Amino acid sequence: MKTMNIPRHRKIRIAFTACISLAMLAACSTSPKNYKTEGEKFLESEDLAKSAGYRYKYALCDQPQSIQVGTQYACIATDNDDNSWEFIIEITGDRELTVVEGKVVK
C-alpha cells in the first residue's frame, strides 16, 4: 500500500482551493449532504488536479455525521492511472474543506 505524503505547502494550496471552490458552489444552506456532494466535486475538480498532480474521477464520499468544524469523513476516488485512493476530508470552517490524508489502496 502506497501512502501519499502531502507537503505542507501543498496542503495549504489544497485548502485554499477548497475554500474558494466551496464558497462559489455552496450558496444554499449547509447540511451534511452538502458537504458530501462538495467533497466529491472537489476531488474531481481541475483545481485539485493541478495542485495534486493527479486527476481524480468517480469520487464518492461518506456523508459526514455533523457539519461541525473538525468533523472528518472518508472519500474514495480513482486517479488518471486507474489507482484507487482513499481520502480523509476535514470540515475546517463554514463551507470549507481540507484533504488531510490521501493514500493509494489499489
Image (tube, helix red, strand yellow):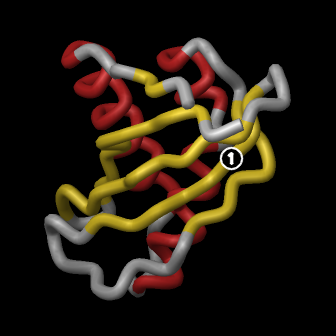
Judge whether 55 appears above or below 35 on screen.
above
The residue sitting at the front extreme is: 1
Residue position marked by numbered label 1 in the rendering: 77
x then y, percent, for residue 67: 28, 80
| Horizontal relation, residue 39 to residue 94: left or right | right
Indicate the amino acid at tag 1: Ala
Which quadrant would residue 10 be assigned to in this image?
top left
Camera-side residue: 31 or 2?
2
Camera-side residue: 98 or 93?
98
| Horizontal relation, residue 85 to residue 11: left or right | right
Location of the C terminus by quadrant is top right
Camera-side residue: 1 or 85?
1
SS of the residue at dot 1?
A: strand
| Horizontal relation, residue 69 to residue 104: left or right | left
Point 62% across, 53% down: residue = 76
x then y, percent, for residue 27: 45, 70
Point 20% across, 18% down: residue = 8
